[in-house]
Amino acid sequence: MDYSKLLVRGLCRGAFLTSVSIVLSLGASEALGQESPPRETVRQEVAKPLQTVQDLVNAKNYQEALAKIREAEAVPDKTPYELFLIDQMRGPVAAAAGDRALAIKSFEAIIDSGRLPPAKTLPMIEAIVGMYYQDKDYKGAATWAERFRNEGGINQKITLLRMQSLYFSGDYANAAREISADIHETEKSGKIPTEELLLLLANSSQKLGNQEAYVAILEKLVTYHPKNEYWAHLIYRVESKPTFVSRLTLNLYRLKFALGLISKASDYMTMALLAMQAGFPIEAKQVIEQGFAKGVLGTGADLAAQTKLRDLAIRDAEQDRKLMAQSEADALSAREGTGLVNVGFNYVIDGQGGKGVALMESGLRKGGLKRPEEAMLRLGMAYALTGQKQKATDTLKAVQGADGTGDLARLWGLFALRPTR
């Protein structure tokens, strides 16, 4: 918002024009509405240099207008009322001339005079906040924005300027507190917090060293404003934890793949190899063929290795499909449910979500699982991949594990609730 233009268009039509009408009376006894007591006058020696100010402003000759105002200001022994009128004229002219410091000084004097009614005080405070912000005097902007609020002002733009000013002035604790409260009220009203505020809170949390709060805001960002950069950063924070175990890497790559975050040849190859090693050649085939289709694979010095892995994945995937019925039968007859979870997930990957999920559910009910939390994670992933949001959320919320299982479950839960396009 350009507050200089706001002042020229608004305040010049209000307080400024009112002041002009008074000084043009050359000292006649005239009241300024609610802005001054009755029978206060302007002496001719003060009013005379101000008479031409309006014409100079209309001609956009702001420097000469300020010179005339300085003449009036030079008159000795000015009354409080004369000072008030001079400030009322000087503030808008200074703003129009680009002298924000002088405009701020004038408007602050007008407000501190106590002669301005509340209806005109709040718009002037808004202008002061904006000019301080434009001058990068963030402490001044925050102070006057707080005064605006304390005097009953309600304006979301001023609220935003206050929160931004607190942050840019280095008051991260108060910035985080006020932004958090604003976001909470926004969510409470059923609305979506702006990306700008969420980023401001994320940065404030980082400055304060509050990593838990920072991650929570990243989660809100991927929920309300899902962008690859936010997802990538959130995923990186999970996989870079010292406690994250390598056996979960494939599940993390699966999330990247589902989000469309895999773009490098090395990532396509790594995921395909992990899928092959885990006994999911159908998945490996899907991954590596996507890499070839997008032109990420199939060129350069690694062409031979990429082609070899693709051919191997195609061959093993065909063989795996031929054996799926037998694998299912073996899993159903097994004493514990690990086989059903694996076979079921394989069906999900192969596009047979209904059948696959049912087998996975049977596997968890059968029990005897070596890693039940990972099995629940995989079932939650299957729900998410097949669009069963509520089941995915309920299942993934129950997943525990400090080795990365719980963290991955939280990410997959966010994925399940992502807006569909």
Image: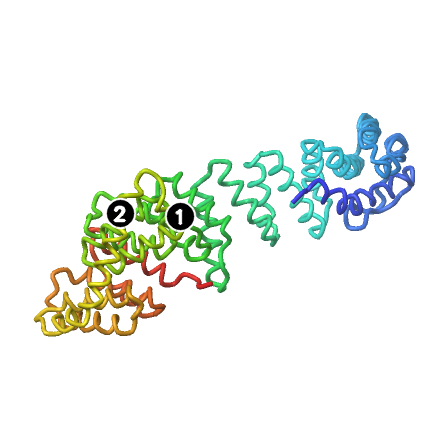
Give the quadrant of residue 98.
top right
Depicted 259 relative to depicted 108: above or below:
below
Q: How many marks?
A: 2
Mark in the foreground, 1 or 2: 1
Depicted 416 relative to depicted 262: above or below:
below
Instruction: Answer left or right for 411 relative to 317.
Output: right
Instruction: Answer left or right for 385 relative to 66.
Output: left
Q: Position of residue 28 (x, y in %)?
A: 91, 41
* Residue at image coords 89%, 34%: 52
Q: Position of residue 275 (x, y in %)?
A: 23, 54
**Residue positioned most to the left:** 335
Q: Position of residue 174 (x, y in %)?
A: 45, 43
User: Is residue 16 in sight in this rendering?
Assistant: yes
Helix, strand or loop at label 2? It is helix
Q: Residue type at mark 1?
A: Gly
Q: Position of residue 278 (x, y in %)?
A: 19, 55
Helix, strand or loop at label 1? It is loop
> Mark 1 or mark 2: which comes first in sequence?
2
User: Is residue 214 in sight in this rendering?
Assistant: no
Q: Residue type at mark 2?
A: Thr
Task: State the residue in front, 316 or 152.
Answer: 316
Badge 2 is on which residue?
A: 270
Badge 1 is on which residue?
A: 295
Q: Residues within 10 Å of mark 1 (few under 14, many from 20)?
A: few
Task: State the residue in front, 181 or 199.
Answer: 199
